[in-house]
Image: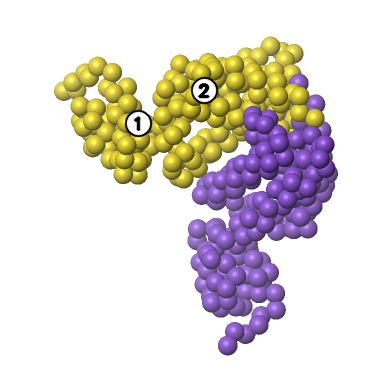
Chain colours: A yellow, B purple
Amino acid sequence: MVRWEPNARGRLERAALELFAERGYEQTTVAEIAERAGLTKRTFFRHFSDKREVLFAGGEAFQAQFVTAVAGAREHATPLEAVALSLHAAGAMLQERHAFARERSAVIAANRELQERELVKLASVAAALAAALRERGVEEPAASLTAEAGIAVFRVAFERWVAEGNERALPDLISESLDALKRLN
Amino acid sequence: MVRWEPNARGRLERAALELFAERGYEQTTVAEIAERAGLTKRTFFRHFSDKREVLFAGGEAFQAQFVTAVAGAREHATPLEAVALSLHAAGAMLQERHAFARERSAVIAANRELQERELVKLASVAAALAAALRERGVEEPAASLTAEAGIAVFRVAFERWVAEGNERALPDLISESLDALKRLN
């Protein structure tokens, strides 16, 4: 019989981030995460495949958010307008989880393997964005360039958003970075 | 006594790329590379620390090329002009090794771990470029944004350069990508 645990997933996330911050990511075990959350290892594995998954779950939904927004942009939107829509869609989704994103970023910054995984994730989003632009009839190399530049905008806005002391919202920082991109000369 | 082997490094590179293409990167050993080159393992290790190094040697010189060019840009160059100089410096350096770059890219595209390493390398160049721009007095987030956008330009131009059938030179493709970046709106 599976006992229902109220907000088990949220408790596991919280416990994992606390432990990663206290002991380091490498030194933390799934058993310790479950214990800190007052849950069993079995419950942990109902929600996450491993401890890395606590940090990277939702990656597919994250990527889908970008792609869906590009696909849904109005017919005559420029490639960059379509990408801007997608950055804002992802930004609005992330904004709700600012505290989580900030703690997660600190854990990732402290671990080379996690940094690599994060780079792979963003490279994969860039490739998906370029494909979504090609679907709209944007030709290469414009599709790849717009997608890569969009991800550059996102990366810079995101870093500022999770930086200590920042109180500005991610969509606002994304707008600012996009404007800066358009002014590059 | 160390016997001098004419162009040992070039022969080892050639042998490694051939074997990586024939058998796959994972399946190739240093002993096999040395044998194919008609050299000893000992000679291999005088030139490279491991087989991955055959693909990533010169990474520091590559990064230094970018940074030096940014630092040497004329005083009133815009941030993007400084970055453009550095992309062209790196492009000119790479152009001399087109065949190597093309074969290397195919090996990397076939191996996830090597792809990650390549992403890390480019992320590191972007960070170094941003730092070089800050040295010139460019403020954040403009420094990071220009650096990241510059790397986006480079990545797109590089992919086109190594693509099958391409006969255009890398500096030419970089110019075209830079122009496309400036026209984004």
Q: In which quarter of the image is the C terminus of chain A?
A: top right
SS assignment at label 2: loop
In the rendering, at what x and y percent does residue A97 appear? Answer: 44, 20
Q: Which of marks 2 and 1 is nearer the N terminus?
A: 1
User: Relative to A81, does residue A41 appear above or below in the rendering?
Assistant: below
Residue B136 visible: yes
Q: For the residues tagged 2 and 1, is the chain the same?
A: yes
Q: Residue A17 carries which label?
A: 1
Residue under mark 2: which chain is it in? A
Question: Image quadrant of residue B143?
Answer: top right
Residue toward you, B14 or B58: B58
In the rendering, at what x and y percent does residue A8 appear? Answer: 27, 22
In the rendering, at what x and y percent does residue B162 appear? Answer: 72, 48
SS assignment at label 1: helix
Q: Disc 2 residue type?
A: Asn
Query: Which residue is at the far top?
Result: A74
In the rendering, at what x and y percent does residue A171 appear? Answer: 57, 17
Label 1 crowd bin: few (<14), some (14–19), many (20+), radius 10 Å: many
Question: Image quadrant of residue B103?
Answer: bottom right
Residue toward you, A136 or A20: A20
- Which residue is at a point 29% across and 29% down the rendered structure image? A15
Q: Residue B172 carries which label?
A: none
Count of picture labels: 2
* Mark 2 vs mark 1, CA separation in Å: 20 Å
Please state which of the two labelled residues, at mark 2 or mark 1, is closer to the viewer.
2
Residue annotated with mark 2: A166
